[in-house]
Image (tube, rainbow, N blue to C red):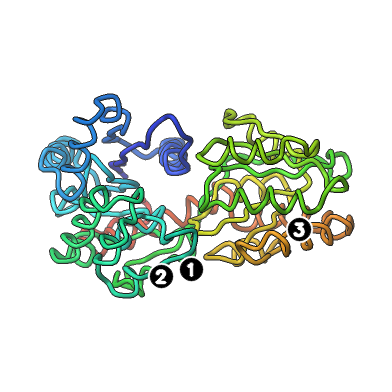
Amino acid sequence: MRVLLVHNHYGSAAPSGENAVFELERAMLERRGHEVQTLERHSDDIRKKGVRGTLLGAISTPWNPFAARRIRSAIASFQPDVMHAHNTFPLLSPGIFSAARGVARVLTLHNYRLVCPAAIPMRNGEVCTECIDQRGVRPSVVHGCYRGSRLATLPLAANVALHRALGTWTQEVEAFIALSSFQKEMLIHAGLPDEKIEVKANFYPGDPLPTPFVKRPEKVVFLGRMSEEKGAADLVEAWLRWGKAAPALKMIGEGPLRKMLSNKAERARNISFTGHVSGEEAQSEIASARLVVMPSRCFEGFPMVLREAFAFGTPAAVSNLGPLPDIVKPAEGLVFPAGDPKTLADSMQALWADSARLENMSRFSRQVFEERYTEDANYEELLRIYERATERAGRPLARGAL
């Protein structure tokens, strides 16, 4: 089978799970003998151009005829069976889908950008689904949801409105990949066609040997962007409430709140901040931790941190928003209310005092990985999605060809 993978890489200044998934799926398909070609753009290309680059990105977001022409050229020369896109923002635009008519078109939805101009349904530190509920974009412009700016929101709002009006998502895509059942239901509520939305979570390649739980140091890890939507401030506040008896909390990552949180926790010897680390270092931290915490205040997709926690048999504690509870419950994970540092501190203390429960959570996490999140299982799911997409495109392939 021939697969054309399409992706606009986010800026290299910050790690991106979407970039990682794109590379992982490309490698997975190539390892299994499929012919793969890529068409890629990089947001770094416009960031280094300053204001001119910002304007170029804004103009390109709703419709980029040059990207559409590149897609037509790539399809003419490569003749793919499937075009699978991960991210079109800002330089590719959804215009690539109409340009790829005749090929089975698949789009992985790593966020809510198709129906929410801000991509993350959140405003003023709280979940906001106004645009999703109304199937419109006026609220986002009124509130300036993208970067707190009405002007910056306009191109993204135009993108959502234009492709609703053109029927891009009902007519020009054969299959959407949602990362969770929760996300699928939200997208159906927003107007995407139920019958075209498939659910496929992220996976972890390989089969790591987990460190025995009793040999791990008494360490808890937060790994992610230190920002309001990720609940980083709630976690630090919970640890300060817990006090000197709390275990070591390692805050890994960068973001707008890092300096403030670091200053706030300066006298707390059990909270450390490490900034960005390599992917290998991040996985090592998760593998050696006794607990991973995700106190998100927003709807997540399928966090890469969780697939790594499952693979390494590391227990997970998550907020009660979006798909997170459904993801960790099979592994007996802890769920706590989002945006409530006091309850978070109480929940953490109770869990940490129950070492037998933590060890059981570790074992269940690894079992869930083996059942759901291996590369083999993910590959079979992806093939089934491609198969249904080619049937909808009127170009069905025999199972042997897949």
Question: In whole angstroms, how far apart are the C-alphas of marks 1 and 2?
Answer: 6 Å
> Alpha-carbon neighbours of circle 3 within 10 Å: few (<14), some, or many (≥20)?
many
Label 2, on which residue?
A: 186
Who comes first in sequence, dot 3 or dot 2?
2
Q: Secondary structure at mark 1?
A: helix
Q: Residue at x 60, y 57 (%)?
A: 372
Residue 384 falls in image quadrant = bottom left
Locate residue 334, reporting x and y percent: 72, 62
Q: Nearer the viewer, mark 1 or mark 3?
A: 3
Depth order, front residue of 180/205 = 180
Q: Secondary structure at mark 3?
A: helix
Q: Residue at x 68, y 59 (%)?
A: 341
Depth order, front residue of 202/286 = 286
Who comes first in sequence, dot 1 or dot 3?
1
Locate residue 90, reporting x and y percent: 26, 42
Q: Are marks 3 and 2 in contact (CB under 8 Å)?
A: no
* Amino acid of disc 1: Phe
* Amino acid of disc 2: Met
Label 1, on which residue?
A: 182
Q: Are marks 1 and 2 in contact (CB under 8 Å)?
A: yes
Residue 279 falls in image quadrant = top right
